[in-house]
Image (tube, rainbow, N blue to C red):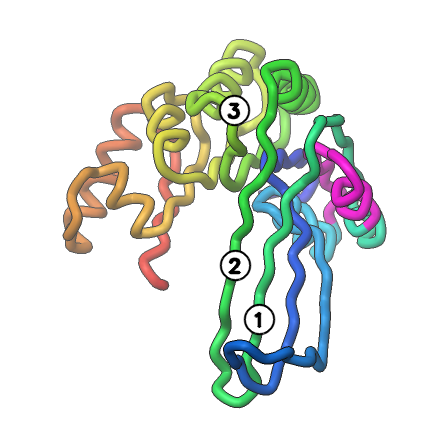
Amino acid sequence: MKLDNIVTLTMNPAIDTSVSVQRMMTDHKMRSTKTLRDPGGGGINVARVLKRFGADPLAIFPMGGASGLMLERLVAAESVRHQSFNIEHDCRANFTANEIDTGEQYRFVLPGPTLGEEEWNAGLGLMTQAASNGSGYAVVSGSLPRGVPVDFYARLARNLKALGGAKLVLDSSGPPLKHALDQGGIYLVKPSLSEFVDVLGNPNPDEAMCLEASRAMVAKGSAEIVALTMGG
């Protein structure tokens, strides 16, 4: 994959806050020894990593409230090109606590905002426009916030196919993933094993069944490449 002409879309971005405490305790104030704040969400994280590899991706995401302003500052601080669109409600936050004594990690994923039709259409329009030049890659990754239709990624795939746009790379789960696969036109889809199981409707597929199902997706035209992650 060439590291140019890459645009990412994150519909449900977050500020990822991480703290380290000596030991997790109930009913006690736990003093953090270390606090980190990073811009998060699938597409934003992809753009951050690509930037470190020398690429110059464009990250598209919604921005709302004080948390949205902080999110945009954090993205800009990593010199990632970005284009945000305004939403009424605050962007979400995620929280991770690392326990030093045991090495255990506790992860809290907080609910995100609810987007109106005009707001999610703005994201769809920006991504379609940015990725409609016929070259490069359009990377969409992460969950969809409340209010966004489950066929959102399928609509994007349809738009890019009609316009001869960039190759679509999809990393999602649940109904949004199913709808996009039914639409087809995806260059690469990257489900985890649990996400793949959900799509197949088989709770206990073995490796051979996963391989067969992946080949069937390619033959059907759902995706040109299926990158299935089998680990935790």
Using the rendered image of the protein, determine whether residue 5 is visible from the camera's viewpoint: no
Is the residue 165 above or below the residue 139 in the image? above
Residue identifier under label 1: 97
Q: Is residue 26 magenta?
A: no
The crowd level at tag 1 (other Cα within 10 Å; few <14, some 14-19, many 20+) is some
Residue identifier under label 3: 148
Q: Are marks 2 and 1 in contact (CB under 8 Å)?
A: yes
Q: Amino acid at mark 2?
A: Phe
Q: Residue, x 67% and y 40% (percent of image)?
A: 91
Q: Quadrant of residue 8?
A: top right
Is the residue 191 above or below the residue 179 in the image? below
Q: Is residue 93 left or right of residue 206?
A: right
Q: Quadrant of residue 122?
A: top right
Whole-percent x, y for residue 29 in the image: 64, 78
Q: Are marks 3 and 2 in contact (CB under 8 Å)?
A: no
**Spatial CA span between label 3 and label 2:** 22 Å
Mark earlier in primary sequence (2, 1): 1
Is the residue 11 above or below the residue 20 in the image? above
Q: Residue, x 74% and y 34% (percent of image)?
A: 64
Q: Out of 226 and 146, give the one closest to the viewer.
A: 146
Q: Residue furthest front?
A: 27
Q: Which mark is residue 108?
A: 2
3 vs 2, front mark: 2
Q: Residue, x 52% and y 59% (percent of image)?
A: 108
Q: Out of 68 and 155, give the one closest to the viewer.
A: 68
Classify mark 1: helix, strand or loop: strand
Is the residue 61 above or below the residue 31 in the image? above
The region drawn magenta spans: 55-73
Q: Out of 192 and 52, give the one closest to the viewer.
A: 192
Q: Residue, x 47% and y 41% (percent of image)?
A: 171
**Spatial CA span between label 1 and label 3:** 30 Å
